[in-house]
């Protein structure tokens, strides 16, 4: 039996009704067979990154983040842009990933839930995300990096997005990420 592919998903938004989080929750709901899509839920509890604190004993939130990254085969991000940049809390998480080494060599992709005109389409945040991920050693799965605009009205009371077109794109992205993991496994 094939081993499941675990994709750790991280939303860059802490907002309760976040379109980015809804996109990832929907990805979890529609994940193809053999893909275990897990949403990271600890963003709000990470301490501010401080290189002096990046040693044992680690803060429990940081230890939990690194354990989740270790267990993941691949990563999927979805983030808004705030004032022309990544949200501070999300950049803080990324800073904690740099020193740990758990992300090294893992396939990663990102989704962009912003529309092209809202107001900059989160272009700077995603350019920055690409740059920061360059320091974490991930392998970017370019074809799985998709803009999937989500309007707030599209999120149902269950927190999920019902749109078949959006769901199809999520399945596609997860499928590409999983294929990359499987390919790497074949060469192990
Ligand atoms: C303080 C603040 C600053 C923002 N700055 C930008 C920006 O620079 N560029 C952009 O495209 N959107 C910007 N936005 C819009 C958010 O990215 C947009 O509302 C997004 O949908 C929020 O994501 P969420 O639904 O996952 O919380 C900003 C929103 C807030 C609250």
Image: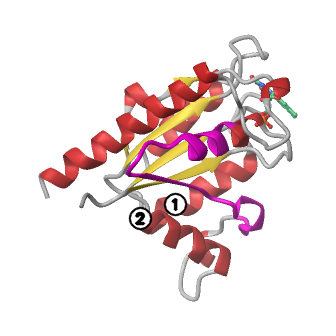
Which residue: 50% across, 73% down?
67
Q: Nearer the viewer, residue 125 or 113?
A: 113
Which residue: 79% across, 25% down?
154
Q: Is 66 located above or below residue 98 in the figure?
A: below
Residue 123, by quadrant, is top right
Q: Is residue 177 magenta?
A: no
40 relative to 130 in the view: left or right: right
The 10 Å Cα crowd at callout 1, few under 14, some 14 to 19, many 20 or more, is many
Q: Is 177 located above or below residue 153 in the figure?
A: below
169 relative to 143 in the view: left or right: right
Q: Which mark is residue 97?
A: 1
User: Of helix, strand and loop, which one carries label 1?
Assistant: helix
The residues colored magenta run 23-48
For disc 2, the marked residue is: 102
The spot of residue 32 in percent (x, y) is 44, 42
Q: Quadrant of the C terminus?
A: bottom left
User: Of helix, strand and loop, which one carries label 2?
Assistant: loop
For ligand 1, the image quadrant comes to top right
């Amino acid at each position: 039996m094939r081993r499941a592919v675990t994709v750790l998903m991280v939303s860059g938004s802490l907002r309760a009704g976040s379109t980015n989080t809804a996109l990832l929750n929907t990805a979890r709901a529609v994940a193809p067979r053999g893909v275990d899509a897990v949403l990271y839920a600890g963003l709000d509890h990470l301490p501010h990154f401080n290189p002096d604190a990046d040693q044992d004993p680690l803060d429990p939130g940081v230890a939990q983040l690194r354990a989740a990254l270790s267990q993941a085969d691949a990563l999927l991000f979805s983030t808004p842009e705030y004032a022309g940049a990544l949200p501070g809390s999300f950049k803080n998480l990324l800073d904690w990933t740099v020193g740990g080494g758990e992300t090294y060599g893992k396939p990663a992709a990102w989704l962009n839930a912003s529309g092209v005109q809202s107001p900059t389409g989160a272009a700077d945040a995603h350019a920055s995300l690409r740059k920061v991920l360059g320091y974490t050693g991930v392998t970017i799965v370019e074809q799985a990096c998709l803009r999937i605009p989500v309007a707030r009205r599209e999120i149902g009371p269950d927190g999920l997005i019902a749109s078949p077109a959006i769901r199809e794109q999520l399945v596609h992205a997860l499928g590409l990420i999983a294929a990359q993991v499987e390919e790497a496994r074949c060469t192990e």
